[in-house]
Image: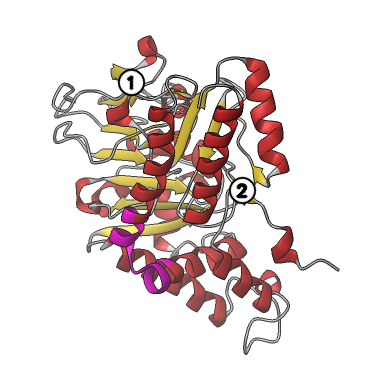
């Protein structure tokens, strides 16, 4: 029988995405029987003291990595970012006379706005649609209403490959961020945010668990008339145990935080790794004399999702087929835009990015553009 490790490819999928190999190996060792518990984490009650400890360790790992200050709650929910598109305005906008403001930098920001429009008054303060979401607003060019209910951004757009490398200065309104596709890729000054949310299946764990970090004063905004699951206070008051939480997902998030802390050395070192990995691919794009055409403007390129096109659809098809033969998988662009997308999240090793870079160079040379 072939060893499972030998069968693994370099997985560039946008999500669910590659997980750290040491995390997968530890989960594999512990799956049948969690040490000292006589059962699998998949069988364990969420009220069991052992799981409560797992939950606490995952929270502590996030707190240490992100230096989360006092005055914030960390919640583990379900429903992915799409549920948060609704929960944010339900809790922070619904029933208010204020306006929620949105910076639309790509497809996911647009989706978030559509859900918010169901719950109250919204205003778009910047929209990159005119240039097909290939850039972000110039620093200092966009300002929110100081009295806005909140201002929402998407820190990284996976489809278009644009990313805020630092927090935009938009004004005093609470900053709400969909950080689903770049959560934990760099140190994050949480004190600049009112609320950060992230589905885990890009950088933090498996599909099925969503992390919400919310400032305490924003918890008070929600109406008691909201359905229980949709009210952040329900989850904050019960320490994410208001309902049966995604126990296995939380367990894996905890393992990922320990990997980041003890094997990577923290988020600053993770950020340096991510910069180096993305540079390998962007240098190849820039050197290709137009054979590879990146979508995002250079100043706004994502460190997580490198998006580009080839000269024509047939060449892209050949590229994907040959990449797959070389065990470079998950490179097809989003169905809405096509092209190529290399997602190089935290757990993608530099060896995988180097292998892709080398293949891109060879493929270009074979096609007469070397």
**Element marked by disc 2:** strand
Numbered mark located on residue 122 in the image: 1
Q: Which residue is mark 2?
A: 11
Q: Closer to the camera, 50 or 104?
A: 104
Numbered mark located on residue 301 in the image: none
Q: Residue at x 41, y 48 (%)?
A: 277
Q: Closer to the camera, 353 or 196?
A: 353
Tell me if 18 is positioned left or right of 93 in this view: right
Vertical position of residue 359 compared to residue 99: above or below: below
Q: Percent position (x, y) of residue 222?
A: 36, 42
Which one is in front in this view, the residue at disc 1 or the one at disc 2? Answer: 2
Q: Percent position (x, y) of residue 331?
A: 60, 36
Please report whichever mark, 1 or 2, sits nearer to the chain's N-terminal start: 2
Vertical position of residue 223 compared to residue 100: above or below: below
The prevailing secondary structure element of the residues shown in magenta is: helix
Disc 1 crowd rating (10 Å Cα; few below 14, some 14-19, many 20+) is many
**Element marked by disc 1:** strand
Q: Residue at x 55, y 70 (%)?
A: 22
Q: What segment carries the magenta color?
A: 260-272
Quarter holding the N terminus? bottom right
Say if the magenta span includes residue 81: no
Q: Are marks 1 and 2 in contact (CB under 8 Å)?
A: no
């Amino acid at each position: 029988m072939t060893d499972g490790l030998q069968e693994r490819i370099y997985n560039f999928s946008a999500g669910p995405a590659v997980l750290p190999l040491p995390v997968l190996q530890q989960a594999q060792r512990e799956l049948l029987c969690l040490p000292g518990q006589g059962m699998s984490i998949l069988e364990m009650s969420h009220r069991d003291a052992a799981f409560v400890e797992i939950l606490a360790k995952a929270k502590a790992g996030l707190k240490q990595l992100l230096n989360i200050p006092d005055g914030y709650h960390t919640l583990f929910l379900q429903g992915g970012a799409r549920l948060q598109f609704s929960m944010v305005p339900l809790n922070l906008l619904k029933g208010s006379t204020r306006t929620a403001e949105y910076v639309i930098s790509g497809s996911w920001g647009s989706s978030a706005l559509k859900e918010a429009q169901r719950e109250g008054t919204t205003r778009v303060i910047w929209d990159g649609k005119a240039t097909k979401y290939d850039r972000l607003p110039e620093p200092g060019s966009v300002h929110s209403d100081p009295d806005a209910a909140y201002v929402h951004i998407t820190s990284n757009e996976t489809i278009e490959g644009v990313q805020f490398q630092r927090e935009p200065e938009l004004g005093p309104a609470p900053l709400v961020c969909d950080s689903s596709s770049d959560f934990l890729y760099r140190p994050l000054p949480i004190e600049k945010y009112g609320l950060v949310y992230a589905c885990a299946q890009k950088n933090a764990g498996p599909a099925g668990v969503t992390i919400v970090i919310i400032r305490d004063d924003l918890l008070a905004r929600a109406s008691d008339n909201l359905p229980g699951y949709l009210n952040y206070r329900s989850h904050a008051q019960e320490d994410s145990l208001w309902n049966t939480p995604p126990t296995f997902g939380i367990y894996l998030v905890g393992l990922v935080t320990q990997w980041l802390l003890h094997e990577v050395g923290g988020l600053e070192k993770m950020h340096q790794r991510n910069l180096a990995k993305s540079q390998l691919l962007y240098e190849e794009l820039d050197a290709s004399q137009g054979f590879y055409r990146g979508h995002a403007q250079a100043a706004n390129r994502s460190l997580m999702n490198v998006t580009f096109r080839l000269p024509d659809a047939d060449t892209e098809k050949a590229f994907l087929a040959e990449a797959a033969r070389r065990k470079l998988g998950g490179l097809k662009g989003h169905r809405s835009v096509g092209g190529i997308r290399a997602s190089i999240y935290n757990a993608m090793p530099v060896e995988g990015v180097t292998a892709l870079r080398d293949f891109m160079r060879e493929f270009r040379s074979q096609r007469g553009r070397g």
